[in-house]
Amino acid sequence: MDIELPSDFEGKRTSCLHFDETSPEKILNEKIQYIVQNTNAKEKSRKPDLKNQIIELEKLFQWYGLEIQQLTEIIEIILSGKHDDEDTRKFIKFLLPRTKVPIKLIIKIFGSLGDKNIKLKIQVLLLRWIILVYNILEDHSELYKFYGVLFHYMDYDTLRPSLCQLLWLMTQREHVKPFRIRKIIELQARVGPEPHLLGLLNLYQNYSPTLITTRVSTTKSIVFKCPDVEWFLLLNQVYTRWNNDGSLINPNNKWRKLDHIEIPSSSAISVFNTFQNTIDIDEILDVKHLASIINEIEFPNHLVSILMEDRILQHILVCDPKEIIILRANYWIHLCLMESVHLNDCETRLDDLLFKLVTMTEFLKELLPVVQEFMIKYIPSWNGTAHQKQIFKLLSYIRPGSFNQILANFLKPLQNLFKISAANWKAKLIHCYKDLLIYWNLLYVKSQKSKQEYHGESSIFKDGIYITDIQDFADYIIRNVLNVENDSIEIQHAVLSFIENFAYLQVEYCCWDRIIIPSSSLIYRSFFSSSGMALSRTCGFMLKFKEGFERASNYNSQDYIKYFNSFAIDIYNCLWKNRPFNKTDKDARGFYIEDVIIDQMQKMCGNDYSNFFSLKYLPSFATISKNCAQLGGREISYNDFRVRILEELLSYGYFGLYDFLYQYTKSSVHSKE
């Protein structure tokens, strides 16, 4: 009998599911019953027909999945051990539940472990299936009772990797016992440091660090991954086609789009105290109540819902962090990200997930390791447009590593996008780099307060070469973008924001052994901009760097300090002393412009050459200058004019320029007094 599936079954989902009482469900039941009845058939003539039935069922299972009774019957067929390996593997792949999986079916599979009639490779597939459907099991509390049964089979080399992953998911504090720790250590001595054994042992240590005296590796290789990506995606696709009550969606209704992440509602979740009494989330009245019970709380199983949606339990995680919780969150978020990326037609799903991850990250002030791993894989193929707001925000929480790693994983791929993007995109990326630098400084300060390295940031920030590399990279992209984008206001604002924060962090937190200033070309370009905003902010960050040199003068060479002083003196000579490009004053360098060029400018400008770069004649302040030249309808002295224009600049918000001239000009001090 030919089975008619939706016309675009091999492609994307159909808009509605054509389903009535006489077709797919009836066929499913008939064929399952036929297989059940012929499982014990000894006649060779029936075997080919049985295989044909299995082949016909394959696509039907993959689309419609199984209800509980059908699921039970297929598991019975698998555990009978009466079919060859090829057919049995297909039966296992047919286990695509429409609704939550009853725990009695899982217990039945546990009871078959070690059965000589069922090959170990088949048992492994069944364990992998349990891992994949773990999040939709009906009652995890019943499952925990079989923890010891599963641990009993750890000696089986073939079963051990899947057993370790399943135990890793099931482990609660009460499961961590000295005899189990000894067993794992003995296994390691016999078979070597297998990643799955290390992962389980590391989990035990997180729960009870005092029980494990040996050092446990914490490398990334011990993080458990999805055992079968393709199978997991198929399971999820079937599960999301059904309503919560297990009935098929009304064929007259449109399919529900995957425009949000399937996360359990936190209102239905309870947490446990140390005496295993449940506390509903709704019963936690306020932060004060939370503080009174915080040391007694254990996190529930639906951890992703808590981390992404429930503020109360996010407070618990921040106030009483446990590495075990982070490990569990990593596992489920890894599955969600993997599914969203692989389902190419579900951009809204990924967008929603990334939005939730941003919310969680902003609250925790830290990227979960699995999110950083995702970013490393995603950024090289990112088009710069999809999920732009979320990606930029997550990038600003990247944890520091070696500069070469940061360069290869993030900076170079982003630079490739930078070259072909519009000015507003470039400005957003520069702001992102600014936020990232602020975040790294936060980590450094945290490590200093706790007297220990936080993700290794202390040693990184004390490495002057590392921060010099970052500054060189920033200078390179900033110089190029200002030139390409013709000093647009949007780009200038982003660039100056980066430099201002760079200066502030160095001076206020002393993160590095020496003060590092931007390149000369950057300072020149910003100062000689036609925008008063850029000129004033240049003066402002120069003043901040001056403060840094005064605080940490012992760490910088005298030549480097003179190099900085040359910029400050040249700016002051231009703006206030009417001696632009003067090279005779102490430390003055005339912006390092060649004498031939200076002579040509003098010839072009004539006698008024010395005034053209002063406050009086700068185009960016022309209106303010004109208003200050006359006071009450009469002309005023040049000294009074300059004092007046400084006050006007202050009233217009040019704080950087005002503060710079105020500090460098003795006459300004006297006037203010």
Image (cartoon, rainbow, N blue to C red):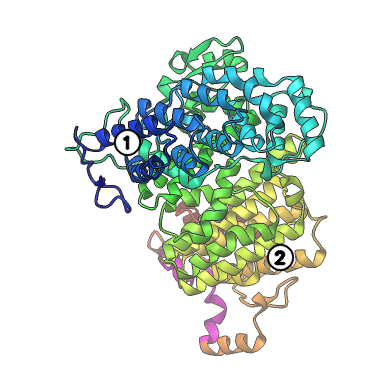
**In the rendered structure, which segment of residues is drawn in magenta?**
605-624
Judged by its main secondary structure, the magenta piece is: helix
- Magenta span has 277? no
Q: Is residue 644 visible?
A: no
Q: Residue at x 52, y 44 (%)?
A: 228
State the residue position of label 2.
Answer: 564
Q: Looking at the image, is mark 1 or mark 2 nearer the viewer?
A: 1
User: For the residue carrying disc 1, how many other residues have a C-alpha within 10 Å: few (<14), some (14-19), or many (20+)?
Assistant: some
Do the residues bearing badges 1 and 2 touch, measured as CB atoms within 8 Å? no
On the picture, is 419 further left or further right than 19?
A: right
User: Which image quarter is the N terminus in?
Assistant: top left
As helix, strand or loop, the secondary structure at mark 1 comes to helix
Q: Give the residue type at disc 1.
A: Lys
Q: Nearer the viewer, residue 60 or 428?
A: 60
Q: Give the residue type at disc 2.
A: Phe
Task: Write down the quadrant of residue 219 in the picture.
Answer: top right
User: For the residue carrying disc 2, how many other residues have a C-alpha within 10 Å: few (<14), some (14-19), or many (20+)?
Assistant: many
State the residue position of label 1.
Answer: 31
Q: CA distance from mark 1 to mark 2?
A: 84 Å
Q: Position of residue 271 (x, y in %)?
A: 52, 18
Q: Position of residue 10 (x, y in %)?
A: 33, 53
